[in-house]
Image (cartoon, helix red, strand yellow):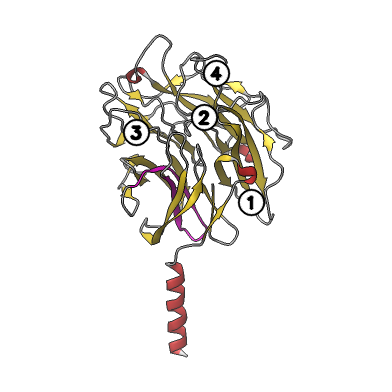
């Protein structure tokens, strides 16, 4: 009897340290650029892109926990073909706010050649029938790379973007800005510059933002300084509803060109985790609540091999999936790769990969009903 108990405990320990199953899932209708979130009820919310890469549409669909497939998608952008996929980093971003309302931002399509388009925002209707009319958010600031959006359960919505003042040239003059709503996106305060003076922003890179239930706001983006020679990963953090921001440099990279990179933020096991790329490798780091900056930086196992566009998810067992693309680039598709970690950010199992990421696209991991992960591409 004692032997059986020992064997049973040993089996449980082995199972706890076994990597969760990862199932690759093609986005419905072969759509591009999936972004996905799972709410407290287990419903998966999916944002994706359809149409020509230089002028298409954002679609939004949901799949309840026990449903076999996503429901009929609805178009997010009220002006047809006013979203863009080219470049990979200018597409849609979304967050779930109060009462599960969806808040979406995306780079628009320029009305004329060589004209910079605005950042658009739209929110879902309270009756679930679709989305309200899109609104331009970025004013006179000259957009290029992608913006970000965050929302909390109290009805606060934060739209972030980076841009340059008209008439000013060079990335050193670009700034990160925020517009804040305290009424779930009905109205927004005027824009506010939140990045430090004298530190620019990498023009063709995306950024990410996250708001937790405790009222803390997080931003990660890539800087551009010293005439564009330095393009570092930086974070901004606010614990007073955006009145003040703490800025930190997390990872330095001297590269005299824009890497057209994106980042990821997710709350996993009660901690905020961020991921980014550098020199063809993907890195991740947990947020240090005491220092109010990122902690130890972890490189994904394996050699650097054109790794880009990281994304993060966690399951009920506390395992963390960091996924990314490999071999993708300008007008070039590639493959998906991923690594599972335990709660202490120790690798579980081996890094895995699979082909099948389309041109201008990336991957989106979410926990699934089986306790594993679905990796949408």
Which residue matches tag 3? Answer: 234
Residue closer to the observer: 352 or 330: 330
Judge depth for marks 3 and 2 and give the one in front. 3
Element on which disc 3 rests: strand
Say whether residue 140 is left or right of residue 104.
left
| Residue 187 visible to an observer of this rendering | no
Which residue matches tag 1? Answer: 41
Rendering coords of residue 51 (x, y %) = 62, 33
Residue contact at pointers 1 and 3, CB within 8 angstroms: no
Instruction: Point out the tag, 3 or 2, that comes first from the N-terminus.
Output: 2
Which residue matches tag 2? Answer: 158
Reply above or below: 289 against 186: below
Judge depth for marks 3 and 4 and give the one in front. 4
Element on which disc 2 rests: strand
Rendering coords of residue 45 (x, y %) = 61, 44
Residue contact at pointers 1 and 4, CB within 8 angstroms: no
Question: Given the current orientation, which residue lies at the most extreme front position?
Answer: 332
Element on which disc 4 rests: loop
Rendering coords of residue 211 (x, y %) = 49, 38
Q: Which residues are magenta?
A: 305-326
Instruction: Point out the tag, 1 or 4, that comes first from the N-terminus.
Output: 1
Is 314 magenta? The answer is yes
Reply above or below: 191 against 103: above
Question: Given the current orientation, which residue lies at the most extreme top position?
Answer: 167
**Circle number at residue 369:** none
Element on which disc 1 rests: loop
Which residue matches tag 4? Answer: 110
Rendering coords of residue 266 (x, y %) = 47, 45
């Amino acid at each position: 009897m004692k032997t059986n108990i020992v064997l049973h405990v040993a089996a449980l320990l082995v199972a706890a340290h076994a990597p969760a199953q990862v199932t690759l899932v093609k986005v419905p209708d072969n759509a591009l650029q999936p972004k996905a979130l799972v709410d407290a009820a287990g419903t998966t919310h999916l944002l994706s892109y359809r149409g020509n890469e230089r002028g298409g549409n954002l679609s939004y669909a949901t799949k309840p926990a026990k449903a076999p497939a996503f429901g009929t998608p609805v178009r997010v952008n009220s002006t047809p073909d006013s979203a863009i996929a080219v470049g990979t980093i200018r597409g849609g971003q979304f967050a779930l706010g109060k009462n599960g309302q969806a808040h979406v931002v995306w780079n628009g399509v320029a009305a004329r050649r060589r004209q910079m388009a605005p950042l658009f925002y739209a929110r879902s209707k309270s009756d679930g029938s679709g989305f309200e009319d899109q609104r331009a958010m970025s004013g006179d600031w000259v957009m290029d790379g992608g913006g970000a959006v965050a929302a909390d359960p109290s009805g606060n919505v934060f739209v972030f973007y980076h841009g340059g003042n008209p008439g000013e040239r060079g990335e050193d003059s670009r700034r990160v800005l925020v517009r804040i709503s305290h009424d779930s996106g009905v109205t927004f305060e005027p824009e506010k510059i939140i990045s430090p003076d004298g530190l620019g922003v990498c023009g063709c890179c995306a950024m990410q933002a996250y708001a937790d239930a405790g009222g803390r706001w997080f931003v990660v983006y890539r800087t551009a300084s010293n005439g564009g020679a330095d393009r570092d990963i930086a974070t901004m953090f606010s614990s007073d509803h955006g009145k003040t921001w703490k800025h930190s440099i997390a990872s330095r990279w001297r590269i005299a060109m824009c890497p057209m990179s994106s980042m990821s933020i997710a709350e996993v096991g009660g901690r905020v985790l961020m991921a980014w790329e550098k020199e063809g490798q993907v890195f991740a780091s947990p947020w240090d609540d005491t220092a109010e900056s990122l902690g130890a930086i972890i490189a994904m196992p394996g050699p650097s091999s054109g790794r880009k566009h990281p994304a993060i998810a966690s399951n009920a067992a506390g395992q963390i999936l960091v996924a990314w693309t490999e071999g993708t680039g300008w007008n070039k598709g590639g493959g998906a790769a991923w690594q599972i970690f335990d709660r202490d950010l120790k690798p579980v199992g081996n890094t895995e990969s699979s082909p099948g990421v389309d041109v201008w696209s990336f991957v989106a991991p979410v926990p699934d009903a089986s306790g594993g992960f679905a990796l949408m591409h």
